[in-house]
Image: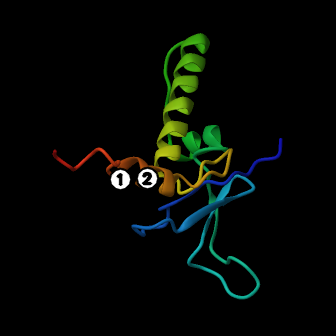
């Protein structure tokens, strides 16, 4: 299965989006030279490589097989929602979420004025 998405978020310790997903793995946007990125590739993407990300985080799920599958599906949904909330771009559509969030937070024409 081919992985990779538009996920871009603070990943390597910065307060700004410094990590991007390439083929399901996170790469440091601050690393690199003229030939490409030089640091990263060992942390799974939390959006498109979620199961691997959960294993990398050390998630331990107990119970019987059915309970483990149910818990894993719930955790995948939770982590993917968290990833979308941090990403600059929607991982699937590529829509700039930073602009969308900023536009949603801006007061509308009828807000902030009194008559």
Residue at the location (67% across, 56% down)? Answer: 25
- Locate residue 113, reporting x and y percent: 21, 49
Label 2: which secondary element = helix
- Farthest-out residue, left: 115
- Locate residue 22, reporting x and y percent: 71, 60
Residue at the location (57% across, 55% down)? Answer: 96
For disc 2, the marked residue is 103
**Color theme of the render:** rainbow
The residue lying toward the viewer, choosing from 5 and 62, is 5
Q: In which quadrant is the C terminus drawn?
A: top left
Residue at the location (56% across, 26% down)? Answer: 72
Left or right of 38, for residue 103: left
- Farthest-out residue, right: 1
Left or right of 36, for residue 17: left
- Locate residue 56, reporting x and y percent: 56, 47
The residue lying toward the viewer, choosing from 42 and 46, is 46
For disc 1, the marked residue is 106
Crowdedness near tag 2: few (<14), some (14–19) or many (≥20) residues, C-alpha within 10 Å: few
Q: Is residue 63 above or below residue 86?
A: above
Image quadrant where residue 19 sits: bottom right
Crowdedness near tag 1: few (<14), some (14–19) or many (≥20) residues, C-alpha within 10 Å: few
Image quadrant where residue 20 sits: bottom right
Label 1: which secondary element = loop
- Locate residue 55, reporting x and y percent: 58, 41
Pointers 2 and 1 in contact (C-beta within 8 Å): yes
Q: Is residue 89 above or below residue 111?
A: below
């Amino acid at each position: 299965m081919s992985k990779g998405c538009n996920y871009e978020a603070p990943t390597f310790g910065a307060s700004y989006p410094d990590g991007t997903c390439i083929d399901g793995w996170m790469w440091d946007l601050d690393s690199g030279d003229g030939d490409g990125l030089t640091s990263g590739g060992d942390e799974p993407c939390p959006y498109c490589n979620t199961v691997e990300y959960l294993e990398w985080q050390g998630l331990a799920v107990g119970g019987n097989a059915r309970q483990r599958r149910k818990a894993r599906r719930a955790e995948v949904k939770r982590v993917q929602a968290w990833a979308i909330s941090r990403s600059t771009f929607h991982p699937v559509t590529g829509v700039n979420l930073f602009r969308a969030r900023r536009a949603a937070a801006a007061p509308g024409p009828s807000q902030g004025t009194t008559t």
